[in-house]
């Protein structure tokens, strides 16, 4: 994949966008940035785009030293906190949309599974700064002592083969998974990808209405069923086609039901509209395993990018950090493909029995370090991207194919791990 060219195109479009006065007008909240002040829209925008998990005072000092081309003024923390509340989080969501658009427009070798782009929908929850405003805005989870903990729910539509987040959303803690999924499907139609698409979903998503919606949109799907689908799960057979029609509905849904056996002996039931016998049980097993990629993406957000270490406590700041993290993740994924290709070519020439890939944490750090300099023109995009790639080739991680872990029901109290170092 020509990840270098795609990244250059993304940076070019973002640079043109943020320097357009229409961008300021579209994403300024209320009458923010209408007066001439030290903290302009663009200066605050670039400051926020440079994700950092340091204290605000340290980060402001570092930002002024490391990104002198921005011309960031020496202001108080209170002034910056107030100014950032004038920028809509949708401004950063727009950058993410550009990364998606340019990837599928410029990628010259999209990989598919039996002709389908494989897209997974899955959600997670994030712990938020413990403020009354966040509890009122997003909701809370109540522990055994009846103490509320501010939480938000998030969901992504994720291209599991290409490691690209197509759509990402954050909402209240009790926001339904299926409502998130419908929003993702609407966004997918807006993007207008030409390839056939296959949707993977876990057991919280399937319903009669969801099956109908996926069929109406002419999408292939493979979804995991839970025990509430007793009319299906209690039937015998490992591979059969049936008409599913719950009580109260007139039109049946034609489903293929397949049962796959996991390594630990657990039997999972999948419902799909891939009726052809050429798609075997082993192929379905391999297909559903691809869904694990979205779980790894959430690990990246929480452990590598440390998204829950929000740079502000206001709901606007939380949403800003969320979309900035999604944009950064896509840039890293696109660049990682080129680094992995270079490493694979080098591996062919060696007799080493191990195979390697790019270190994702290193790439996140390098991309975050140079992104602002590229967007401000302080450095040239092509040269800087090649510099990052060259460095990343030398900082590699060993591949561990078919690595499997059993899910732990009880989590360790340990908070600091040797293999979980912050990279921002």
Image (cartoon, rainbow, N blue to C red):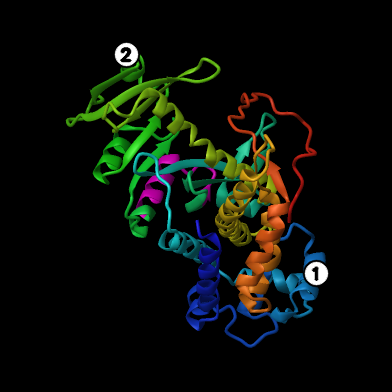
Taking the spot 65% from the left edge, 71% from the top edge, the residue there is 383
Q: Which residue is mark 1?
A: 62
- Which quadrant of the figure contains the C terminus? bottom right
Taking the spot 42% from the left edge, 36% from the top edge, the residue there is 201
Residue 126 percent location from the top left of the image: 61, 45
Lower sequence index among marks 2 and 1 = 1
* Residue 75 horizontal side relative to residue 257, left or right: right
Residue 259 percent location from the top left of the image: 39, 20
Q: How many marks?
A: 2
Taking the spot 60% from the left edge, 33% from the top edge, the residue there is 401
Q: Using the image, tell me which numbered label, if any, was put on residue 48.
A: none
Q: What residue range appears in magenta?
A: 170-186
Q: Which residue is mark 2?
A: 235
* Residue 196 horizontal side relative to residue 248, left or right: right
Residue 296 percent location from the top left of the image: 59, 40
Q: Nearer the viewer, residue 407 or 44?
A: 407
Q: Is residue 92 magenta?
A: no
Q: Secondary structure at mark 1?
A: helix
> Is the residue 92 above or below the residue 266 in the image?
below
Residue 123 percent location from the top left of the image: 51, 41
């Amino acid at each position: 994949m020509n990840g270098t060219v795609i990244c250059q195109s993304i940076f070019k479009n973002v640079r043109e966008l943020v320097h357009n006065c229409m961008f300021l007008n579209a994403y300024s909240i209320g009458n923010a940035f209408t007066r001439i002040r030290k903290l302009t829209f663009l200066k605050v925008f670039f400051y926020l785009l440079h994700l950092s998990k340091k204290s605000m005072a340290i980060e402001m000092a570092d930002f002024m030293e490391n990104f002198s081309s921005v011309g960031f003024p020496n202001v108080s923390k209170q002034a910056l906190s107030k100014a950032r509340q004038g920028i809509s989080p949708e401004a950063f969501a727009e950058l993410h949309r550009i990364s998606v658009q340019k990837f599928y427009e410029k990628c010259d070798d999209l990989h598919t599974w039996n002709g389908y782009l494989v897209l997974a929908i899955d959600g997670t929850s994030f712990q938020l700064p413990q403020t009354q405003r966040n509890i009122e805005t997003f909701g809370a989870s109540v522990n055994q002592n009846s103490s509320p903990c501010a939480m938000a729910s998030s969901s992504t539509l994720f291209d599991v083969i290409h490691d690209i987040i197509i759509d990402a959303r954050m909402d209240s803690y009790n926001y339904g998974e299926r409502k998130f999924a419908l929003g993702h499907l609407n966004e997918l139609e807006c993007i207008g990808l030409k390839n056939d698409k296959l949707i993977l979903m876990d057991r919280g998503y399937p319903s009669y209405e969801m099956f109908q919606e996926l069929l109406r949109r002419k999408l292939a799907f493979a979804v995991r069923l839970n025990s509430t689908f007793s009319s299906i799960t209690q039937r015998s057979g490992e591979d059969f086609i049936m008409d599913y029609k719950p009580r109260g509905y007139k039109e049946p849904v034609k489903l293929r039901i397949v049962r796959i056996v996991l390594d630990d002996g657990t039997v999972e039931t999948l419902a799909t509209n891939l009726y052809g016998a050429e798609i075997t049980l082993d192929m379905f097993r391999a297909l559903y395993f691809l869904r694990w990629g979205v779980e790894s993406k959430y690990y990246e957000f929480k452990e590598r990018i440390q998204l829950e270490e929000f740079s502000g406590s206001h709901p606007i700041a939380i949403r800003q950090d969320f979309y900035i993290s999604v944009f950064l993740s896509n840039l890293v994924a696109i660049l990682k493909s080129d680094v992995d290709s270079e490493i694979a070519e080098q591996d062919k020439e060696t007799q080493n029995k191990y195979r390697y890939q790019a270190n994702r944490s290193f790439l996140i750090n390098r991309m975050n370090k140079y992104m602002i300099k590229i967007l401000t023109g302080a450095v040239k995009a092509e040269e800087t991207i090649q510099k990052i790639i060259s460095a990343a080739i030398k900082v590699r991680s060993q591949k561990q194919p078919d690595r499997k872990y059993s899910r732990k029901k009880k989590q360790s109290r340990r908070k600091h791990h040797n293999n979980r170092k912050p990279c921002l």
